[in-house]
Image: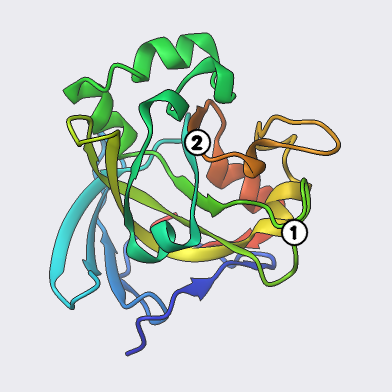
């Protein structure tokens, strides 16, 4: 089974089968959803970089999503340290109330952040544009360590790739701030947006793998 990520494609999704175990061939992960009347909880068994399995139970947020803009090497490593001065501040495109709520990175805030669908992108290659081969990654944060040296340590699990050119085209819908010559995808930072990311992507006819 390949460890390569599958890519989200623009197509009309088929009907969901929430009670069926789903195996994602491309990302080498097995996802099974169980009905729970109180909360939409999923048990996710994913293969990490060295082949070990870990279980992540997530209740996927439809209210917020996270956006990280980091280096290509950071995305490949699935772990990086991001500076506090460019994390969850108003100057990097975070609303004041969201910054106040999440920037302290309390245990409760970190627990909630781990439920957010998250885009991990690298810098645009041509201002507010990029080439067709440039891919961002969609996944979930698994580790937030605010005590790390020189910043905040982030680790994540990725599930699929998304065209970064498409993200630029959808910037307004996704709350990605900027102007004609420069937007948030041109600057390393971490932002949280009060937007239902999964719904926006599906409205754009982007088919996503489970658990999204």
Residue under the point 68% across and 50% down: 167
Picture coordinates of residue 129 (x, y %)? 78, 53
Label 2 with label 1: CB-CB less than 8 Å: no
Residue 77 visible here:
yes
Q: Quadrant of the C terminus?
A: bottom left
Residues under labels 2 and 1: Cα distance? Answer: 18 Å
Residue under the point 32% across and 62% down: 19
Work out whether 91 lies above or below 12. Answer: above
Work out whether 131 lies above or below 63. Answer: below
Residue 17 visible here:
no
As drawn, the residue found furthest toward the front would be: 150
Mark 2 vs mark 1: which is more N-terminal? 1
Q: Is residue 108 left or right of residue 12?
A: left
Q: Is residue 169 left or right of residue 27?
A: right
Q: Quadrant of the N terminus?
A: bottom left
Crowding near pointer 1: few (<14 within 10 Å), some, many (20+)? some
Picture coordinates of residue 49 (x, y %)? 24, 72
Q: Nearer the viewer, residue 212 or 98?
A: 98
Picture coordinates of residue 77 (x, y %)? 33, 63
Work out whether 180 lies above or below 75. Answer: above
Residue 189 image label: 2
The local secondary structure at tag 2 comes to strand
As drawn, the residue found furthest toward the right would be: 180
Crowding near pointer 2: few (<14 within 10 Å), some, many (20+)? many
Picture coordinates of residue 32 (x, y %)? 26, 64
Residue under the point 36% across and 49% down: 140
Q: Nearer the viewer, residue 120 or 43?
A: 120
Q: Nearer the viewer, residue 180 or 116?
A: 180
- Tell me which corner region of the image, top left, top right, bottom left or bottom right, holds residue 83: top left
Residue identifier under label 1: 130
The local secondary structure at tag 1 comes to loop
Residue under the point 55% across and 54% down: 122
């Amino acid at each position: 089974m390949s460890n390569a990520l599958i890519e989200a494609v623009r197509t009309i999704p088929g009907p969901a089968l929430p009670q069926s175990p789903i195996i994602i061939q491309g990302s080498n992960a097995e996802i099974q959803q169980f009905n729970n009347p109180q909360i939409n909880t999923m048990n996710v068994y994913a293969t990490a970089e060295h082949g070990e399995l870990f279980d992540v139970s997530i209740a996927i947020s439809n209210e917020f999503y996270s956006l990280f803009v980091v280096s290509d090497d950071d995305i490949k490593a699935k772990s990086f340290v991001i500076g506090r001065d460019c994390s969850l501040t108003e100057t990097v495109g975070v609303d004041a109330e969201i910054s106040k709520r999440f920037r302290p990175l309390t245990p409760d805030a970190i627990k909630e952040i781990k439920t957010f669908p998250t885009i991990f992108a690298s810098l645009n290659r041509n201002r507010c544009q990029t080439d067709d081969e440039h891919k961002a990654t969609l996944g979930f944060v698994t580790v937030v360590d605010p005590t790390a040296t020189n910043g905040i340590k982030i680790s994540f699990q990725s599930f699929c790739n998304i065209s970064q050119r498409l993200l630029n085209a959808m910037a307004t819908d996704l709350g990605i701030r900027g102007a004609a010559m420069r937007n948030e995808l041109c600057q390393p930072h971490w932002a949280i947006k009060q937007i239902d990311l999964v719904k926006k992507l599906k409205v754009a006819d982007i088919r996503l793998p489970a658990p999204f």
